[in-house]
Amino acid sequence: MTEIEEWTPEAAAAIGLCEAWAEEVTAAIPCTIYLFGSAIYNGGDQFDIQSSDLDLVVVFDEDLDATERAERLHLFSLYKAKLELRMVPSLRRTNCKDPGVSIVPITALELTGNIHKSGAPRFFDKNIFLDLATGKQSLGLPGAGLGMLPYNSRQALEYVQKVRNQFLAVSANLTGGISPFDEVDPLPKPLARAAAQLDPNAADGEWYDTRLGLEYLFAELTRRRSESDALAALYRKVSIRRGGRGRRSPLTAADQLLLAELLYDLAAKIPLEAVATWEIRFGGTPPTDAERSRLVDELRRLVPDAQVLGIFVGSIVIRVRSSKRSYATIRQLQQLRVLPRFFGVKTVDVSQPSDPGEPGAFTGISIVERIAGRIKDWRPQSRDSLLATEAGLADWIGQWLAEEKAFAHTTVSREALVSDGPGAARADFLLRLGNGMPEQLLAIELVRLRNRSSFFSQLEHVLQFKLPTILVVVGTYEQIDGLREDIRRLEQLSARVRVVAVPLDNG
């Protein structure tokens, strides 16, 4: 059990700097700015003012066209330069040649589709962010991951984000950013390759054809050249670089940014698909780790866009999020009674889609849910110390396990090692369930709230565990109510961590 102060002095200074800067930016540019990474991770314990970056996500509020987004990013770059300069005296930073701030600007589409430049499929709904306007941390960003895009659109939008991030990567001494492009090719190959994958007329073998991508993107530039002076000038420059008459000149950072935003518009034409959360239960097969892994691999082969949210202890029930189209395919295959043969098991059942965060059809009465239900009825004393609170939970669980015949062979360990290696982690309690093979393990971790950061710091800790976990959150009714949305979002995103909120006796 832990009780965590809010921020280290170094992290607090960095957060204060970012909050003041964000207030200035949002007064001029309609957007919401979030801080994530080492400055807020575990109370800022790993943040180093000399070597750590300030990692920011900027969500633009308006729906803009390519030229308008490029202009917005030019304006934003001026504010970003100010932040780089202010870091030097405010944080006593001595390195001025490398950027100290990394910014990922995104649109509502990219947020909804959960698209990040790294290619991580769950970046915006699984990380912890600090809203610089409200000062509140949250698990994931509001609206993240509510839709899915096909691979060709995702890779194009990931490339666009990389270009934006690089465009803004200017250090305090005004070096860095995107270098001018003046090679033999008319356009950078990564740009042309990303465009080729969007061409609906690409034949087999042409998906990565840079010549095809060049023609596809240039056709879009030709079609839209009258929309703005910037597009008209870019059209003339690219036309000459393709062999037209005129003086050939390099593509500047601004040119490359505008071309990337044209690519964005092409990728954004493909509509988002709605998502569904559902469960699949396998019967007639032992719940071993090897069998679970095999079935997950087979499921991903059958449902390529499947995101596995969790595998439940004591059974082989997998909670999945996928496109509704993929879910409909699974249901049709179930009706044709071909799933048991495909998976090599006796029976396969598929649930109806559930509301986010709600217990699934197959997991609502699971072992974890039974134990969580018992913990919900526990009422710790507000006057108790941290150690007394933890001891009270141990007594509450132990007495119930002794009375329940179904848990007669369950053992409880305190301060148990649940992961090894450099990131070794311990849980307050480790339950070994039953006397069968394989052994079923369940971790229970306890946190008593001092502030919102207490919850997120402990959440970061339990996410290191590689086994099902119940996170018991103890606090006042007001503190717990302030975390309801984050708890709901966590249960939507991960079936491995079950949060049980317990109010204090006089909370």
Image (cartoon, rainbow, N blue to C red):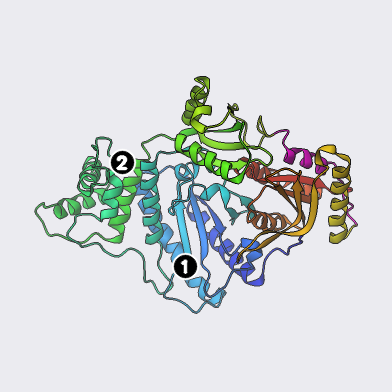
Residue 254 in sight from this viewpoint: yes
* Quarter in which the N terminus is drawn: bottom right
Q: Nearer the viewer, residue 51 or 265?
A: 51
Residue 295: name its quadrant. Answer: top right
The spot of residue 216 in percent (x, y) is 23, 42
What residue sits 56% from the left and 37% below the top? 320
Q: Nearer the viewer, residue 227 or 507?
A: 507
What residue sits 65% from the left and 40% below the top? 312
Q: Are marks 2 and 1 in contact (CB under 8 Å)?
A: no
Identify the magenta region: 364-383
Residue at label 1?
Answer: 82
Does residue 452 appear left or right of residue 409 in this picture?
A: left
Is residue 422 depicted above or below 449 in this figure?
below
Q: Secondary structure under badge 1?
A: helix
What residue sits 77% from the left and 45% below the top? 501
The spot of residue 370 in percent (x, y) is 77, 38
Mark 1 surroundings: few (<14), some (14-19) or many (≥20) residues within 10 A: few
Q: Nearer the viewer, residue 104 or 412?
A: 412
Residue 371, magenta (yes or no):
yes
Residue 190, magenta (yes or no):
no
Q: Give the residue type that dot 2 points to.
A: Leu
Does residue 268 appear left or right of residue 226 in this picture?
A: right
Q: Give the residue type that dot 1 points to.
A: Lys
The spot of residue 341 in percent (x, y) is 50, 28
Q: Nearer the viewer, mark 2 or mark 1?
A: 2
Q: Secondary structure under badge 2?
A: loop
Mark 2 surroundings: few (<14), some (14-19) or many (≥20) residues within 10 A: many
